[in-house]
Image (spheres, rainbow, N blue to C red):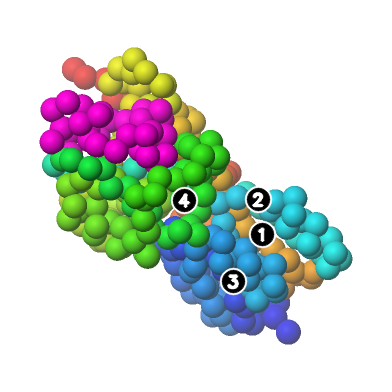
Amino acid sequence: MDTTSSGTIRIGVDETFAPILTSQVDTFQKLYPSAHIQAQYKPELDVMQAFLKDSIRLAIVARDLTADERATFQRQKLEPRTIRIGVDGVAIIVHPSNADSLLTIAQLQGIFTGKLTQWSQLSAKNKLGTITAVFDNNNSSTARFVQDSVTRGGALAKGVFASKSNPALLDYVATHPNAIGVIGVNWISDRDDPKVPKFLSRVRVAGISPKATGSVSSDYVQPYQAYLAQKTYPLRRELYVISREARAGLGTGFASFLAGNKGQLIMLKAGLMPATGQVRMIEVKPN
């Protein structure tokens, strides 16, 4: 039988959070050598299906349980515990040659619903042709988030496709000047991760404005930690750990670690907004 710091457990992690959760799992296991966490990185829908079927005891996803999911647990006479552990952003990325890297929510809505199909519809000078929108996976949390928060329930355009993984998405946008991609911020936010500068040298992170029209340059913000903290970046989402443990086992221990000081510091270092604690913001004034 496992304890809060020993034993073996299978957990499910939304694959858009693979970089940050890999770091969290590695740190926890170094602190507690008798703990063995088998993390399965999958699309959000697959993680939640495994969680409902009791294939995993812990789910780390970008949403809380739905009413139907809670009803399922009630029938199982279980009371899952949900802990908010951070704030993430959904980043919009384009090819470095694309001059249109400042986009409004209204323009994104047009792109993802298929109302805007050509880059020239955003700017007459843009000659990149047909817009190709790409996600990491059809069942991913980023695809669901765009439908919930950008298209407002509207169906995604027929031309939108999935690249099968986040690295594949980054590679596609980096090699297709007409592409626009949607990716979790933690793939491009931790500057200490040697892969991040390589990613950022190949793509451009778009600035997003919540205003429909008439935006000025100062309205556009990128998904930096400070803007997540200030709530000025419009494509923010909460990160949760959900446990179905009926007793204090290893899942409870890992969830407590994620929500505790060490786990929150790892979140901060990775460029996300921790659920607890302060982000220090310094205003630099020109001479």
Residue sitting nearer the eye, 62 or 284: 62
Q: Residue at x 25, y 47 (%)?
A: 179
Residue 86 visible, this orientation:
no
The residue stretch that appears in magenta: 98-127
Q: Amino acid at mark 1?
A: Ile
Q: Residue 11 got which mark? A: 3
Please say if the residues under marks 2 and 1 sit with CB atoms less than 8 Å apart: yes
Q: Earlier in the sequence, mark 2 or mark 3?
A: 3
Q: On the rendered image, what quadrant is the C terminus found in?
A: top left
The residue indicated by pointer 1 is 242
Q: Amino acid at mark 2?
A: Asp
Give the structural element (helix, strand or loop) at label 3: strand
Question: Which callout, 2 or 1, points to the residue nearer the camera?
Answer: 2
Task: State the CA–CA distance, disc 3 to disc 4.
Answer: 22 Å
Hey, which quadrant is residue 227 in on the image?
top left
Image spot of residue 132 (x, y percent): 28, 47
Q: Amino acid at mark 4?
A: Ala
The residue indicated by pointer 4 is 143
Question: Which callout, 4 or 1, points to the residue nearer the camera?
Answer: 4
Give the structural element (helix, strand or loop) at label 2: loop
Question: Which callout, 4 or 2, points to the residue nearer the camera?
Answer: 4
Image spot of residue 31 (x, y percent): 53, 72
Residue sitting nearer the eye, 149 or 191: 149
Q: Residue 64 got which mark? A: 2
Q: From this viewpoint, which residue is outermost toward the bottom?
A: 1
Q: Earlier in the sequence, mark 4 or mark 1?
A: 4
Q: Is residue 126 left or right of residue 17?
A: left
Q: Residue 156 got which mark? A: none
Q: Earlier in the sequence, mark 3 or mark 1?
A: 3
